[in-house]
Image: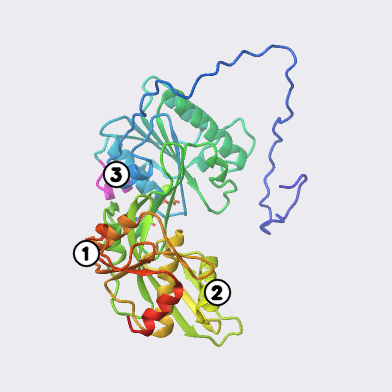
């Protein structure tokens, strides 16, 4: 922000990118004059009807939203350009149109373009009301009319403009004002409002960050360009948990749901390769098995390379430091590459032990057993700590045909775990024991 005209933005270095905004009337006017009305307080207990939910019948989407869509709520769907936001919402709109009236307002694409997409997705017959519009005044007037729809999709909020505001569409003040009006209308008329928001796009000043506080649910649609998988993640949800993810696969007929992501993420795994380890992770309530790959190679650089895809690089530094200081495995002269196969991003500390096992396996050139899953958190003194939802992790591993599990020592030794369906449990108390396993050749 700059208080006067400037040709160059000091933050990003771009020329002519600064847009003037009229100052908002932020000086409180005080309370002189009229007296306020008394507010009545009530207890927390009361007759609140359970929230009715609209089901999209796209199970992955419903789960991420906390079990369906709540009428009167606003959802923001953000994501990189071309990741598939319009595709997902068109599919959801088509599915919802079987039960309620759905309006799809595209400011980005002409009607014909959306129709072409619908044709490609095999949804041309769906009863979605389609329009191409960008004027907030027109959109509000239409939606506030006699038969307002049950679901409204605005693709995207950056293209909507209010003619009363003197700045270009997509600027912070426009996006804020348009979203505010639309959300107010959604609450008043009780329709579900989907807003598409761009995270980065040339010329877009306001990312969805401005909107995140205003909407009820924020979903991010993410994925790796090189992969077909797309992950839908809730980062905020007033009506459900935020740790759920939905997994989709982008096909030429649109987004297909992936009901069993573990099998998909492990599909291309080659067993008995040093540096590869299967991590039994959790994404929300769902267990998810993924392959973690590490490559430890001698480095010629004075400060060796550390490259991480799909995991936290500071977490990798921590595991490397613990291996060095507590277990005597120094990798400071090596380049270390770490990759979560399939393009998934892991945020759980429970992956520490699997990362350590992959690193030790690569460094010692000894494969981790192909039928073994690993999970556990590593502490700074090298101790392996218990993690949550052990049973779900073990069940999923057993379901996918794994026979052994390397787990924190708090799971009792030598026993097969009741949840593990015959899975042989190898408890690990300290990271040193992992090195021991590889020395003995497991
Ligand atoms: N004919 C096609 N066959 C297969 N996949 C296609 C085809 N056309 C588009 N796609 C896929 O759909 C993606 C674009 O989807 P979509 O337009 O829904 O993305 P978006 O997130 O809405 O993009 P934008 O940010 O531009 O609005 C492409 O990246 C591509 O993967
Ligand atoms: Mg789009």
User: Quick check: is the Cβ at mark 2 less than 8 Å away from ligand 1?
Assistant: no
Give the left or right position of residue 197, taking residue 395 as reference.
Answer: right
Residue 84 x/y as whole percent: 39, 52
Residue at x-position 21% and y-position 64%: 422
Residue 182 x/y as whole percent: 49, 31
- Which image quadrant: the C terminus? bottom left
Query: Which quadrant of the figure has residue 439?
Result: bottom left
Q: Which residues are magenta?
A: 114-124
Residue placed under numbered mark 1 in the picture: 422
> Is residue 276 shown above or below 202?
below
- Verify CB contact (< 8 Å) between mark 1 and mark 2: no
Q: CA distance from mark 1 to mark 3?
A: 34 Å
Picture quadrant of ligand 1: bottom left
Q: Main secondary structure of the magenta part?
A: helix
> Is residue 343 shown above or below 19?
below
Q: Give whichever of 103, 16 is nearer the camera.
A: 103
Could you tell me which secondary element the residue under label 1 belongs to? Answer: loop
Q: Give whichever of 235, 47 is nearer the camera.
A: 47
User: Quick check: is the Cβ at mark 3 less than 8 Å away from ligand 1?
Assistant: no
Residue placed under numbered mark 3 in the picture: 58
Residue placed under numbered mark 2 in the picture: 321
Residue 249 appears in view: no
- Residue 121 is inside the magenta segment: yes
| Among numbered discs 2 and 3, the one appearing first in the sequence | 3
Tag 2: Cα neighbours inside 10 Å, few (<14), some, or many (≥20)?
Answer: some
Give the left or right position of residue 256, taking residue 349 as reference.
Answer: left
């Amino acid at each position: 922000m700059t208080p006067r005209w400037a040709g160059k933005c000091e933050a990003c270095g771009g020329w002519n990118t600064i847009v003037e905004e009229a100052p908002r009337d932020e000086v409180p006017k005080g309370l002189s004059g009229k007296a306020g009305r008394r507010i009545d307080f009530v207890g927390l207990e009361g007759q609140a009807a359970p929230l009715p939910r609209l089901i999209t019948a796209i199970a992955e989407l419903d789960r991420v939203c906390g079990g369906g869509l709540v009428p009167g709520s606003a959802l923001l769907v953000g994501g990189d350009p071309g990741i598939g936001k319009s595709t997902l919402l068109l599919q959801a709109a088509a599915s919802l149109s079987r039960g309620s009236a759905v309006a799809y307002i595209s400011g980005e694409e002409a009607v014909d373009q959306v129709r072409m997409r619908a044709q490609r997705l095999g949804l041309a017959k769906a009863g979605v009301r389609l329009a191409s519009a960008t004027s907030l005044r027109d959109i509000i007037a239409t939606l506030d009319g006699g038969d307002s729809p049950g679901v409204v999709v605005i693709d995207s909020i950056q293209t909507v403009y209010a003619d009363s505001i003197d700045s270009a569409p997509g600027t912070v003040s426009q996006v804020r004002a348009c979203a505010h009006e639309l959300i107010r209308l959604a609450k008043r008329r009780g329709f579900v409002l989907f807003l598409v928001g761009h995270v980065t796009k040339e010329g877009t000043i306001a990312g969805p960050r401005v909107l995140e506080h205003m909407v009820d649910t924020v979903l991010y649609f993410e994925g790796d360009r090189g992969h077909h998988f797309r992950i839908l993640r809730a980062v905020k949800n007033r009506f459900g948990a935020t740790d759920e993810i939905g997994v989709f696969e982008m096909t030429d007929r649109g987004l297909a749901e992936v009901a069993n992501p573990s099998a998909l993420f492990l599909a291309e795994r080659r067993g008995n390769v040093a540096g590869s380890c299967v991590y039994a992770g959790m994404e929300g309530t769902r267990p998810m098995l993924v392959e973690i790959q590490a490559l430890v190679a001698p480095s010629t650089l004075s400060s060796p390379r550390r490259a991480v895809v799909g995991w936290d690089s500071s977490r990798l530094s921590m595991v490397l430091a613990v291996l060095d200081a507590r277990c005597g495995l120094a990798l400071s002269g090596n380049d270390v590459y770490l990759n979560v196969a399939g393009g998934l991003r892991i945020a759980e500390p429970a992956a520490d032990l699997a990362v350590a096992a992959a690193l030790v396996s690569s460094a010692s050139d000894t494969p981790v057993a192909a039928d073994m899953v690993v999970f556990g958190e590593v502490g700074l003194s090298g101790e392996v700590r218990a993690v949550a939802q052990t049973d779900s992790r073990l069940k999923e591993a057993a379901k996918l045909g794994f026979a052994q599990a390397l787990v924190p020592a708090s799971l009792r030794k030598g026993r097969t775990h009741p949840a593990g369906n015959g899975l042989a449990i190898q408890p690990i108390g300290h990271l040193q024991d992992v090195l021991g396993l590889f020395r003995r050749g497991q």
